Amino acid sequence: MQYLTSFTLPTEKEESGYLLSMTNPRTNMRCYPQNFAYPFKIFPQKMLSKITFEPLTIFYGTNGSGKSTLLNIIAEKLELERAAPFNNTPFFSDYLAMCRADAKPTRDSKIITSDAVFDFLLDMRAINDGIDRKREQIFDEYDRTHDPNVHMQLRSLDEYEEFKRFRDAKKSTKSDYTYRRIPENIQTKSNGESAYAYFTEQIRENALYLLDEPENSLSAARQRELAQFLMESVRFYNCQLVISTHSPFLLAIKGAKIYDLDSVPADICRWTELEAVRTYYDFFREHESQFL
């Protein structure tokens, strides 16, 4: 299923015309050097204008290639849901107005960035820290009820809840009492396992998803699992995916259309032709004898 067919970026001529309008009173561009008018002056250098999409499309490139920027441009133009802020400038809205998209995303469509995953992991850690502190308080409460020098009598209804807890602790084991009064830790997995679970929970049927370097925090084995999950999401659940990555496991997904943003002009290529993949290949060839 395709919810995004094509996306057209401003041409070099269109960008130049805008950047020369330094007297624009709304943007007050006299205050900003042209070199800092992000996201202008990135993609004309790569001779990249119109992008056509398949059910699974990948933007490949090294750091600074513009692959994450391109995802954010598409996401903002399509007004997709996002969970984390992104690098914005006063010129972003004017740039978006110059872009054109042939797209009909569904309501569930969204962009999932590395920052969103990282924020999720931090939230889980903060919640777990709070639960751990609460658990220590429950332990102390239980220990006090089993102190032979501590006695409690119900003197008023205001003390009823405290009295019930005291009686409950007296007739329970420490583990049972704690289990009933506090939830288990939300996160009992590693960061990589939790990050993988985040993608499987966020990606649903019948929607367009933009994924920014989803391999971050994932081991090689988890990257292979994620690649399988993403392939099945496209094949069986009517999802369309646009991914920025340099993970060989994701680049090797069968049927992916890959744009190499490191090349000029940025063009479609096979995953085995990419520099990062060739680097892995050469490395393992050099150490081939150690695998025998």
Image (spheres, rainbow, N blue to C red):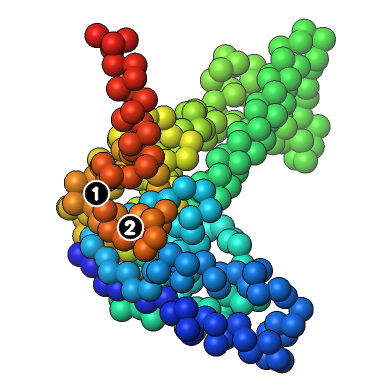
Earlier in the chain: of badge 2 and badge 1, it is 2
Task: List the residue tagged with mark 2.
Answer: 259
Q: Nearer the viewer, residue 41 or 141?
A: 41
The answer, for residue 261, to whether it is visible in the render is: yes
Q: Secondary structure at mark 1?
A: loop
Give the number of callouts.
Answer: 2
Q: Which mark is residue 252?
A: none
Horizontal arrangement in the rendering, residue 130 relative to residue 189 (left or right): right
Residue occupying the point 57% across, 14% down: 173
Residue occupying the point 33% across, 57% down: 259
Q: Nearer the viewer, residue 10 or 218?
A: 10
Residue occupying the point 81% across, 32% down: 155
Return the x and y of residue 86 as percentages of the image width and height: 58, 61
Residue occupying the point 37% across, 25% down: 283
The image quadrant of residue 280 is: top left
Task: Quarter of the image for the N terminus: give it.
Answer: bottom left
Task: Quarter of the image for the C terminus: give it.
Answer: top left
Q: Amino acid at mark 1?
A: Arg
